[in-house]
Amino acid sequence: MSRAAKTTFLATTAVCGLTLLGVHYLQRSERAQMHEGVIRDEERSRIKRERQDDFDLQAKLKEEFLKEQSVRETTREVEGGK
C-alpha cells in the first residue's frame, strides 16, 4: 500500500472511532438527564402527596372542631357603600 492510502485509511479509522465514542458519550449523558427528570418527578409527587395529606388532616381537624364548638356565620351588610 502506498503512503497516501495508509494515511487515508488511518484517518478514516480515527474519524469513525471518534464518532462512535462521541455517540456513546451523548447516549450516556442523555440517559443521565432523563433519569434526573424521573427523580425530579418523584420529588414533586412526594411533595404533592405531603401537601394533600396536610390538607386532609386540616379538613378533618376543622370538622372535629366544628362538632365541638358552635360556630355561626355573621354577615354585615354595608350601608350606603360604607
Image (cartoon, grey):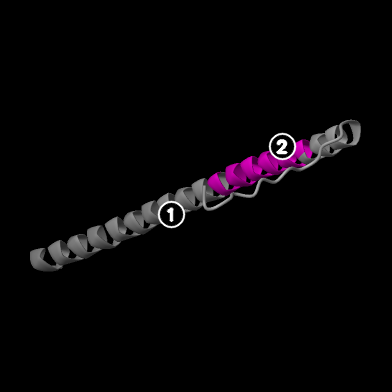
Query: Earlier along the polypeptide chain: callout 1 or callout 2?
Result: 1
The quadrant of the rendering that contains the N terminus is bottom left
Q: Nearer the viewer, residue 64 or 72?
A: 72
Q: In which quarter of the image is residue 69?
A: top right
Vertical arrangement, residue 47 with respect to residue 35, above or below: above
Vertical arrangement, residue 5 with respect to residue 81, above or below: below
- Give amino acid for label 1: Glu
Q: Is mark 2 on a helix, strand or loop?
A: helix
Look at 81% across and 34% down and name the residue there: 61
Q: Which of 1 and 17 is in front in this view?
A: 17
Left or right of 76 on screen, residue 59: right
Question: Where in the figure is residue 64, as x and y percent of width and height?
Answer: 87, 35
Left or right of 39 on screen, residue 9: left
Question: Where in the figure is residue 41, as x and y percent of width and height?
Answer: 57, 49
Left or right of 79 on screen, residue 67: right
Disc number at residue 54?
2
Disc number at residue 79?
none
Residue wearing tag 1: 30
Judge the density around disc 2: few (<14), some (14-19), many (≥20) Cα neighbours within 10 Å. few
- Magenta segment, which residues? 40-58
Vertical arrangement, residue 31 with respect to residue 3, above or below: above
| Residue 50 is one of the magenta-drawn residues | yes
Question: Where in the figure is residue 33, as x and y percent of width and height?
Answer: 45, 50
- Give amino acid for label 2: Asp
Look at 59% across and 49% down and name the residue there: 78
